[in-house]
Structures are given as C-alpha cells and as structure tokens.
Amino acid sequence: MPDAISIVASPSVQGILNSPIAFQPLLDEIPIAVVILDKNRRVVAMNQAAEVLTGLPAKRVMNLPCRHVLRSNVCVKNCPLVSIDNDGAPVCVEGDIINVDRQRIPVRITAARIQGMDGSTLGYMETLDNMSLIQNLEPEKQAAFGFAGIIAHSPKMESLFQLIPSVAQTDSSVLITGETGTGKDLLADSIHQASSRAKGPFVKVNCGALPETLLESELFGHVKGAFTGAVENKSGRFRLAHNGSLFLTEIGDLPLALQVKLLSFLDDKTFYPIGASKPAKVDVRIIAATHRNLEEMVRERRFREDLLFRLNVVRMHLPPLRERGEDAELIMNHFLNRFRTTFKKGVKIFDPRAKDMLLDYHYPGNVRELRNIVEYAVNVCEDETITVDHLPAYLTNPERYASAPQPAKIPQPHTEARPTDTRPHAANWEDAERELIMDALVQAKGRRGQAADTLNWARSTLWRKMKKHGLDDKG
C-alpha cells in the first residue's frame, strides 16, 4: 500500500516510536470505519471496519473516487470535503451510504485534512460511525409492536423479545432456528445490537452459498502462496468480526470438514488460516441459524453432535407466521406503509376481501413471502385501495390456494372412537375451512381455546374465522 503510506509517512508519524509504524495493521485496529483519500478524493486505504461497513474489500476500491465506494447521499449535496477545502476545519455530517448488498445504512461522517509538514493538503481522512446502532426511527411503534425492527405483538414473539436483552449481555453461542423467511437474520442482528459488542462489526456468512474450498478461505482466510491464485494474504470473516459477532446463517449446510474447524475455534478462540503455521486468535461471538432439523442431521451423520452441543448453548426458535395470530395484519400494514412511501404511491388500505384472503393464507414463505406479496400489490395498484385483483395470481387461483401447506395436525388420543365422516368433500377452500373449524369445535366439545390449540391457531384467529363463517354464535 505505498500510496496510503506516503500520505501519513510524515517525520512526525515516524518519530513517535523508535521504529517506523506499520500503517495498515494500525489502521485495522481502529474499531470504526476509516477511509484515507488522496487530494483527488480517490481511495488509497481503508481499514477492516470500513470493509465490513461497505461490504467491499480494500483491494477492489483502491484509486476509485470516494463517491463510488460510499455511495452516500451527502456526496451529491453536502460533500464534507468541499467544506474542508473552503475553510480547512474538520467537518461532521450525517447521511446514508449504500453497501454492497444495496442496504441503506445511516452514518455520521467526520472528515479532516491530512496535512504535509508545510501545511499543504496531501489528502483526507474520513471516519464513518454506523448510526443504525443507536438510531430509533419509530420509538412509539417499536415499544408497542416489536423489538429492534422485528414487528410483532403475539405472545410467542413477546416471550422471545424478553429473552433478547439477557441473551445479548453474554458471549454464549446462540442457535436460532425457524422456517425460511421467519426473520432469523433480524433476530441475530438484534442480539448483536443489544450487546456490548454493538460498536464492533456484525459479519454475516451464508454457509450454503459457496463451495467448501472457497468457504474455508472466506471464513478463515489464507496466507500468500497457500494455493494457486493466493497472491496476497486474506483476512477471512473471523478476523473481520474481531470484537464483534459472526453470524453463520444456514449452519446446517456447513461441510463436515469445516465443522471440525469451527468446533476447534469454539474450544479456544483460535484458528489457522489456510497455509499458516501460526494460529490466529480473535474475540468473536458466534451466532448461528438454520431452517434444518440439526438433531435429525446428527442421526444421519451429516452434522457433528459435539458441534451441535457447542452451538446450542442458547437456542431461540422463531415461530412461523401462521402461528403468530394477529401479527400477520400488523406486518401487512407495516409493509404497506413502507412501500407506499418508497414508491411514492397513493395506496392507503386493503379492501375487506383482499385483507381476508391475505389473513387466511398460511404463508409457507412466512414474513418474507408476505413482504413480497405486499410489495407486488403496491407496485401494481394505481388506486387508493388494494383489491384481490392486485394480489399475485397464485393467491387468487383456487386450486393453488387450496393446496397451500396446512397447519400441522396434532395427534389425538385414542380414548374415544369417532364416527366416519360421510359428508361430501368440500367444493372449495372456504367450505373446507368451515368444516375444519366445525370438526375442531365438536372434538373440543365447544371449548374454543382447545379447538384453537387443535388447529394450531391463535385464539383470536379462530374467533375471527368463526365470525367470518357465521359460526360465532354456535358451538
């Protein structure tokens, strides 16, 4: 990194200690994102915290204009470097950047000149504080309806929210389970943000996204010359997550060979980069997530039992959306407000028929599927009211709708024989659902709470559906 060193290699910097200071390792020890620019505002150095924040490795952004790396809204209207050029004083502004995953991250940018011994401007230094760690955009809504961006009000989710603060204050490994689309990423991020590691990096790795050979290098890094194509040292995600949290999503897809290496790290917090002869030690908390049944994978010898024991210190399960009662309506309205603002549309409400169809659907894709449905509806709706015509076709197709996954059946005791049901099969989903409710009420002898448990529904969901089918004054 000769360009970066030349910017800071003034006699005063070299004179601090008896020997010249290694610049990049010193930069990487700074816990907030730092970007060094030359006087033409091109990136000549950045630390590991900046790599984590932007999602871009330093070698890919060298000599690129700052605005192409940070992609911040302040680059257009309020560039702090312009103010520095005018009066020379450091400048602090707030804005957003767009990371490599196209996520908008609120930041506080502090910029200052890098001066030569004669006072001339050699370049600039920018630090970026991630404001999402402390920013609370909707305090009233979050206090009433969720935690750290997770929208919910159901008893199961509120019980989960109560665990987060206490779990966050320890360094124990956490295993998050739940179906696809339930919000495991959000829960992992919430644990990190509520912890003492919140100012450190939160690094995510999808264990199923890369082949084993690439995944090992991505996780643990490598040294120069370790294999063909290893032309320089690579830090790896474990080192990037130092003093923070490493989120291993889809941990069930981690190859067995890497499971051994992860287990070794959990034992002593050290690991060997590929090709290294000396171990590296980092301070990292492991949060893992999966939609798979790891116990079953252990029985099939596809997942190590000892690793499961080490990960399963704290287990948090996210229930599917169909078991979260009235959360579906809360989330539906949340996404409606978000997308109508994002797309600048005049959409205001769902009409009763569209609303009922959405609330009656079982969402095999959970919250992610509901989000996509609402986003689609807001896109195609040109009026103030979303109707059934604005919903995706697979929801309005009776055959596809009737074949959606149903709630799991609860095994029934064999203490009493039930007469064979000789009624004709229901002609459509509405009739089938009505018969399902009536059967559950008969079996529960009219006790609605027990009927709701049998159907694996929240009580409020059962009462709403009974009213819909004209059963609210029966049974």
Image (tube, rainbow, N blue to C red):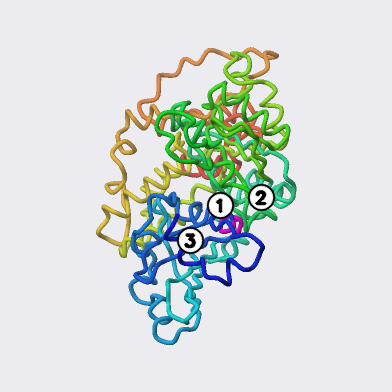
Quarter the N terminus occupies: bottom left
- Position of 36 relative to 149 (above/below): below
Mark 3 or mark 1: whose residue is earlier in sequence: 3
Counting from the top left corner in percent of width and height, residue 391 is at 31, 45
Indicate which disc residue 150 carries. 1
Counting from the top left corner in percent of width and height, residue 11 is at 55, 71
Secondary structure state at the residue bearing disc 3: helix
- The Cα–Cα distance between marks 1 and 2, rounded to whole angstroms, is 9 Å
Counting from the top left corner in percent of width and height, residue 179 is at 52, 34
- The Cα–Cα distance between marks 3 and 1, rounded to whole angstroms, is 44 Å
Total marks shown come to: 3
Q: Residues within 10 Å of mark 3 (few under 14, many from 20)?
A: some
Mark 2 or mark 3: whose residue is earlier in sequence: 3
Q: Are marks 1 and 2 in contact (CB under 8 Å)?
A: yes
Foreground tag (3 vs 1) = 3
Q: Amino acid at mark 3?
A: Ile
Q: In the image shown, does 209 or 62 lie closer to the viewer?
A: 62
Q: In the image shown, does 224 or 326 lie closer to the viewer?
A: 224
According to the picture, the residue beneath numbered tag 2 turns out to be 161
Foreground tag (2 vs 3) = 3
- Position of 471 relative to 139 (above/below): above
Quarter the C terminus occupies: top right
Q: Amino acid at mark 2?
A: Phe
Secondary structure state at the residue bearing disc 1: strand
- Left or right: residue 78 versus residue 19 is left
Secondary structure state at the residue bearing disc 2: helix
> What residue is rendered at 46% in x and 27% in y?
213
Spot the residue most to the front: 18
Mark 1 or mark 2: whose residue is earlier in sequence: 1
- The Cα–Cα distance between marks 2 and 3, rounded to whole angstroms, is 47 Å
Instruction: Tell me which segment is drawn in magenta.
Output: 26-31
Indicate which disc residue 5 carries. 3
